[in-house]
Image (spheres, rainbow, N blue to C red):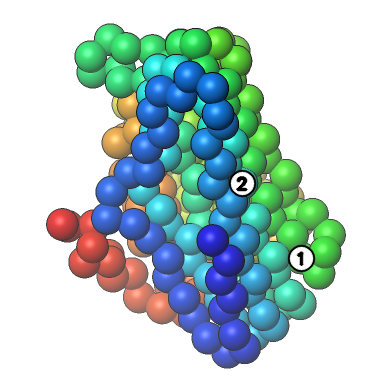
Amino acid sequence: VRAAVTKKAHALVTSPGATRFYLSKDANAQLQQIVRVTSGSALEWLPQETLFMRGARARTVSRIELEDDARFFGWETLGFGRPALGESCSQGEIEARFEIYRDGKPLLLDCFRVGDGRLEGLLGHAAVTTLVATGADEIALEATRAVLEGSSESRMAATLIDDLLVVRGVAHRCEPLFKRCVEIWRCLRPLLLDRPASDPRIWLT
């Protein structure tokens, strides 16, 4: 999938449901998404979760290429297995990359790898998310941390790298992570993108 946001345009990209990868005995499934955001434009990348089932062999890449002062707000959420059924993501090989560039220089290079269901570093959780926003400052960081306070279903933390806000989180399932990402977006959209928060109708289908 290749797309471009032209100058002075504002695009919001989302999905009505989860992306799913199922058992593959031999071949690797591949998904590559590359979006170029030109100067003076903005992209909101708000997909629902990507789910990897038992035995999935998949490689995904989401690459956002920002030009000059282009703005970005987006996230990627990954879920492994079907926790509600007690099914782990075993016997699979997964690589999921989330990359943000500005004028060809990397702002974020996030790579998550899973081999044979080994989810090292997730403390027994089965879902992980990364949220990124450009043009952020200490005010945006503190507002984000306020949203994250008191969460019992997920473990999330926010940090600021220059003007890049990065939020990472883990949970036992995807829903709490998506909910928190949406809450952060609602809080920061007026601040970072000069637009009031209005949930896409497709999320209600």
- Given the current orientation, which residue lies at the most extreme bottom position? 8
Query: Residue 89: in sight, yes or no?
Result: yes
Where is residue 189 drawn, in percent x and y?
Answer: 44, 68
Task: Give the position of the N terminus as an image quadrant.
Answer: bottom right
Helix, strand or loop at label 1? It is: strand
Q: In this view, does 100 lie above or below 5?
A: above
Q: Do the residues labelled 2 and 1 touch (CB within 8 Å)?
A: no
Residue under pointer 2: 61
User: As shown in the figure, which amino acid type bears the numbered disc 2?
Assistant: Val
Q: What residue type is labelled 1?
A: Arg
Taking the image as shown, residue 87 lies to the left or right of residue 27, namely left
Q: In this view, does 85 lie above or below 130?
A: above
Image point 53% across, 86% down: which residue? 9
- Classify mark 2: residues with Cα within 10 Å, few (<14), some (14-19) or many (20+): some
Residue at the outermost front position = 26
The image position of residue 39, as x and y in percent, is 69, 83
Front-most of 122 and 60?
60
State whether residue 189 is above or below residue 81: below
The answer to whether residue 93 is left or right of residue 45 is right
Among the 4 quarters of the image, the one containing residue 111 = top right
Give the structural element (helix, strand or loop) at label 2: strand
* Residue under the point 50% across and 45% down: 76
* Between marks 2 and 1 in the image, the one whose residue lies nearer the viewer: 2
Identified at 42% across, 57% down, the residue is 46
Question: Can see residue 72?
Answer: no
Residue occupied by mark 1: 102
